[in-house]
Image (cartoon, helix red, strand yellow):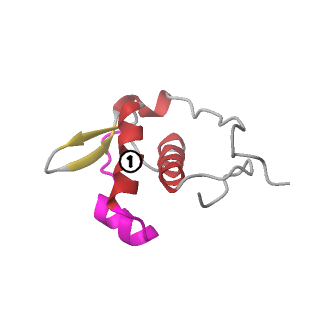
Amino acid sequence: MIDLNENGFKLYKFEYIRDMMIKNIASGNLKAHAKLPSVDHVCESYSLSQVTVRRAYMHLRKRGYISHLPGLGYFVQETAGVLDIEERPAAGNRKPIV
């Protein structure tokens, strides 16, 4: 686990990347059909492994935020702007930092 989100919960690295992308999509910084940074670019920018970044992108795909076109990259889905960001409840070892 690494960083803290705004609610004070510790996040796994892939969750941090996933949530950052969701916020960029929800805020309009990443618009429909926009190409996401490559896996290699995110790895280099945040000193992460490809497994971590691919896991974050996989979660975004499963939730309908992005799509993947082999050989071309990852793209924001047209319907991504209407999806809600889910709140993360405190569970297990995710305790608020006081």
Residue depicted at 42% across the width and 70% down the height: 45
Res. 58 image quadrant: top left
Q: Quadrant of the N terminus?
A: bottom right
**Left or right: where does residue 40 sit relative to residue 12?**
left
Q: Is residue 78 above or below residue 97?
A: above
Q: Is residue 46 above or below residue 14?
A: below
Residue lying at the far left of the rendered structure? 71
Q: Which residue is mark 1?
A: 55
**Left or right: where does residue 20 sit relative to residue 41?**
right
Q: Quadrant of the C terminus?
A: bottom right
Residue depicted at 30% across the width and 50% down the height: 35
**Spot occupied by residue 63 in the image (x, y as percentages of width and height):** 42, 31
**Left or right: where does residue 46 sit relative to residue 71?**
right
What span is in magenta?
Answer: 32-49
The three-letter code of the residue at mark 1 reads Arg
Residue depicted at 35% across the width and 36% down the height: 61
For mark 1, give the secondary structure.
helix
Res. 46 image quadrant: bottom left
Whether 47 is among the magenta residues is yes
**Spot occupied by residue 39 in the image (x, y as percentages of width and height):** 31, 58
